[in-house]
């Protein structure tokens, strides 16, 4: 039973690693490095400011 759980854990870890690698490649192809490393003014909202705006 423990051996089955061990192999299952390795299989899940491998599947997640493969999924992350595929997502990495897709993201790199879809967006340029300039876009991924920058943020535009107003795009990132401070949590406190966002909460106050949502309440009013």
Image (cartoon, helix red, strand yellow):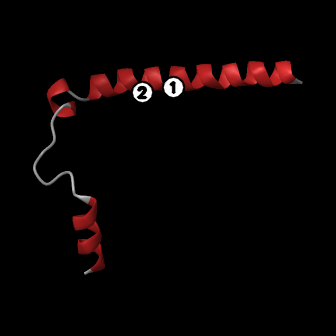
Q: Position of residue 30 (x, y in %)?
A: 28, 28
- The residue furthest front is 48
* Image height of 31 relative to 40, above or below: above
User: Residue at the spot x=30%, y=78% of the render?
Assistant: 55
**SS at circle 1:** helix
Label 2 sits on residue? 23
For the residue pair 8 and 22, the one nearer the viewer reads as 8
Tell me if label 2 and label 1 are in contact, CB under 8 Å.
Answer: yes
Measure the alpha-carbon separation of dots 2 and 1. Answer: 6 Å
In the image, 52: left or right of 5? left
**SS at circle 2:** helix
Q: Where is residue 26 in the image (x, y as percent from the top left)?
A: 36, 25
User: Residue at the spot x=21%, y=51% of the render?
Assistant: 44
In the image, 18: left or right of 49? right
* Image height of 34 relative to 42, above or below: above
The N terminus lies in which quarter of the figure?
top right
* Image height of 28 relative to 50, above or below: above
User: Residue at the spot x=76%, y=21% of the render?
Assistant: 6
Label 1 sits on residue? 19
- The residue furthest left is 41
The C terminus lies in which quarter of the figure?
bottom left
**Can you tell which mark lies on residue 35?**
none
* Image height of 19 relative to 39, above or below: above
Q: Where is residue 24 in the image (x, y as percent from the top left)?
A: 38, 24
The quarter of the picture where residue 39 lies is top left
User: Residue at the spot x=25%, y=73% of the render?
Assistant: 52
């Amino acid at each position: 039973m423990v051996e089955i759980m061990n192999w299952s854990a390795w299989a899940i870890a491998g599947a997640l690693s493969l999924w992350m690698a595929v997502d990495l490649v897709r993201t790199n192809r879809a967006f340029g490095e300039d876009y991924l490393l920058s943020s535009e003014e107003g795009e990132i909202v401070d949590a406190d400011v966002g909460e106050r705006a949502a309440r009013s």
